[in-house]
Amino acid sequence: MNNTLLTVINLNKAFFMNQQPLDFFRSRKKNTIKVIDNISFDLHHGEILVVAGESGSGKTTLARIIIKALNADSGKIIFDNRDITNLKGKDLFRIRSKMQMIFQDPYSSLDPRMKVFDIIKEPLQVHNKGLKKNEIKQAIYSALSKVNLEPLDEISNKYPHMLSGGQRQRVSFARSLVLKPKLIIADEPVSMLDVSVRLQILSLMKKLKEIDNISFLYITHDLSTSRYVGDNIIVLYKGQIIEYGNLQDVITNPLHPYTKALIAAIPKLRQSEYSKIAVKNEFDQSTTYQGCKFLHKCIYAIDKCEHEAPNLTIDDKNHKVRCFNYKS
């Protein structure tokens, strides 16, 4: 039995840079920047896969391509045993009920003019599930109950501005759950919440994974939250996967200098052997790379790094790293 829900194969995406209106009529070559660079990975049923990296590493662009809000330049996306790479129209519409996205800002992702009941009801109306009035109410209350928003009657009749940040994000989860999706893409869902509320949202993700077997693509720059909630992790740098493996293996035994630097920057995860890890303070203006993309920041770089791009290498336990000199 195939346990794989989502397979991404050799995904690529580039954007034009500094493009002016007249550039469409000029013959000169346009500058591009590759934001997604040959990314491949699998996500299994009931798995929380963490996608970590700094701002600008390509995390949100990757999510938008998977959800089909943005088209890739090349590569394949296979979801629930179906190639959805080039799906359009009604076929894409039907697939989208099985994958939902939760956004970073719970203050702007909910319509302030709608009550909670109507916010959660909207996906059912859009996807025309053909439910009766009492069935719609039951589905909405069931979703609210799953995210621990009670009393149900009181919460469902409130407007978003009447709720706390944590409650609003729970409403976002309930809006996604009402369609009974197989995959939820959570884009920095706790970054704008108070520290005391973050653990509640992360615990909710774990609960939904265990009880409903929902898979999560959890996008974050915070490795401390990822350690609590994730099963496996992808570390992105300039649109490339530079480390990939079991989350605990990657956190306790990071192989790439960039991953070590990320861990060294987080006090709760810092370990003595990584506490002095540093990167070069050099600004990289290049948009094309012959060698390693991390070259200008790496303190372990060798001559080979400048002229040859490293591939993802399997170290052990299926722990992958994109580095020539990772054993240093």
Image (tube, helix red, strand yellow):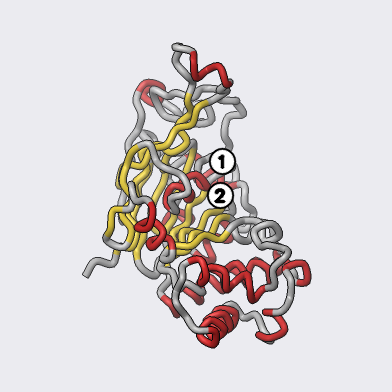
- Reply above or below: 19 against 161: above
Q: Report crowding for label 2: few under 14, some 14 to 19, many 20 or more residues within 10 A (C-alpha).
A: many
> In the rendered image, is residue 195 in sight?
yes
Tell me the amino acid under the disc marked 1.
Ile
Query: Residue 273: x, y in percent?
Result: 53, 48
- Reply above or below: 224 against 120: above
Element class at badge 2? helix
Q: How many marks?
A: 2
Query: Residue 260: x, y in percent?
Result: 51, 45
Q: Residue, x 69% and y 72% (percent of image)? A: 115
Q: In this rendered view, identify the residue nearer to me: 245 or 53.
A: 53
Q: Which residue is mark 1?
A: 277
Element class at badge 1? loop
Q: In this image, 128 relative to 18: left or right?
A: left
Q: Earlier in the sequence, mark 2 or mark 1?
A: 2
Q: Residue, x 64% and y 66% (percent of image)? A: 169
Tell me the amino acid under the disc marked 2.
Ile
Q: Residue, x 51% and y 22% (percent of image)? A: 286
Q: CA distance from mark 2 to mark 1?
A: 9 Å
Q: Are marks 2 and 1 in contact (CB under 8 Å)?
A: yes
Q: In this rendered view, identify the residue nearer to me: 47 or 80.
A: 80
Q: In this image, 176 relative to 327: left or right?
A: right
